[in-house]
Image (spheres, helix red, strand yellow):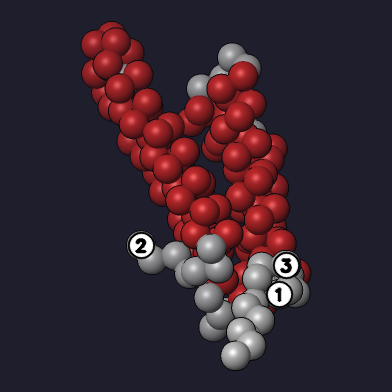
Amino acid sequence: MASQPTETSVDRPVDPLVTWARVVYALHAFSLLTAIIGTATLVGAFLTGWPSIIAVILNYLKRSEVRGTWLESHFRWQIRTFWFGLLWVSLCVAFVVATLGIGILVAWLPLGVVGLWFVYRIVRGWVTLGDGRPMYA
């Protein structure tokens, strides 16, 4: 009895929008990598680095094209990662300003948590995209 050929990732054509989502994850990862290698913080590099800013702009440019597809969840995940990160950092900065001297001493903890959150979101999203699955919050 002959076995049926199985479909592998090599056999499937790559959708240009999947490539687009990969590029966005790569841009975000590049921002994080520059922070790890350079002198910037993870949070600072992610939110103010050109790669992440370009990535969120790319998300908005192609967002309408992925509406109704499984890729919509990845685009939403990427956009929310950027904007929620900005919110968390703003709250951390507000905490530092509100408490002045003591806030500076403990600000590294919430900023470190936000930095790890960025890494988690990018890695989880990229791996899930590689598996061809939608993101679930």
Q: Residue at x 50, y 46 (%)?
A: 123
Find the distance from the CA under tag 1 to the CA under tag 2: 27 Å
Say which of 80 and 125 sits in front: 125
Q: Amino acid at mark 1?
A: Arg
- x, y percentage for residue 34? 64, 26
Which amino acid does the dot numbered 3 rest on?
Answer: Val
Q: Position of residue 104 (x, y in %)?
A: 33, 13
Do the residues bearing badges 1 and 2 touch, measured as CB atoms within 8 Å?
A: no
Q: Residue at x 66, y 81 (%)?
A: 5
35 w.r.t. 7: above or below: above
- Residue drawn at the location 50% of the way across and 28% of the way down: 42
C-alpha span from label 2 to label 3: 29 Å
Assign a secondary structure to mark 3. loop
Asked whether the beta carbons under mark 3 and mark 1 sit within 8 Å of each other, the answer is: yes
Q: Earlier in the sequence, mark 1 or mark 2?
A: 1
Residue 78, given in percent of the width and then of the height, sits at: 53, 55
Residue 87, by quadrant, is: top left
Q: CA distance from mark 3 to mark 1?
A: 6 Å
Q: What residue sits 33% from the left and 36% below the top?
A: 91
Q: Amino acid at mark 2?
A: Ala
Most foreground residue, 81 or 29:
29
Q: In which quarter of the view is residue 60 placed?
A: bottom right
Q: Secondary structure at mark 2?
A: loop
- Tell me where residue 108 sits by quadrant: top left
Labelled disc at residue 137: 2
Closer to us: mark 1 or mark 2? 1
- Which secondary structure, mark 1? loop
Q: Which residue is mark 3?
A: 10
Foreground of the two, 129 or 65: 129
Check disc 1 and report the residue beneath it. Answer: 12
